[in-house]
Image (cartoon, rainbow, N blue to C red):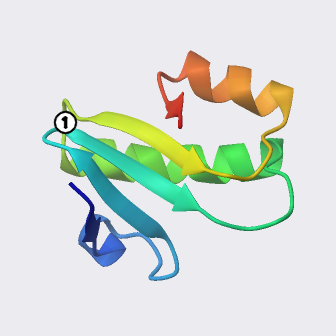
Amino acid sequence: MKNLIDPKEFGITGKTVIEQVGKNHYAIVISRKSRIIMTDGRKLLDKFKLIKKALPGVRLSLKTTTPVCGKTIFFLKDHKIDII
């Protein structure tokens, strides 16, 4: 199931790609060449919080082919966000 969700439903900018991966599973998709660092992780967490506020009880993930900084991986895992 690959359903793209309009990010404006959650109050997130239109450039953000949100995909419904499963029944109660949503992922923010990042497709770029540069690595994801802590600054990006904090911004992503803010977006995940907006999704969680609108849809409590959903599972959230970051879907990316980009390398992710080790600190950012631990940061997102601490906030129960999986990396696909």
- Assign a secondary structure to mark 1: loop
State the residue at coordinates (71%, 27%): 73
Q: Where is residue 61 in the image (x, y as percent from the top left)?
A: 45, 39
Q: Position of residue 64 (x, y in %)?
A: 61, 51
Considering every residue shown, the one lying at the far bottom of the view is 14
Question: Which residue in the structure is indicated by mark 1?
Answer: 56
State the residue at coordinates (61%, 29%): 76
State the residue at coordinates (35%, 70%): 11
Considering every residue shown, the one lying at the far left of the view is 23
| 12 sits left or right of 46 in the view | left
In the rendered image, the vertical position of residue 14 relative to residue 38, given as above or below: below
Write down the quadrant of residue 6 in the picture: bottom left
In the rendered image, the vertical position of residue 83 relative to residue 29, given as above or below: above
State the residue at coordinates (53%, 49%): 46
- Depth check: 72 or 52 in front? 72
What kind of residue is marked 1?
Answer: Pro
Dot 1 crowding, Cα within 10 Å, few <14, some 14–19, many 20+: few
| 57 sits left or right of 68 in the view | left
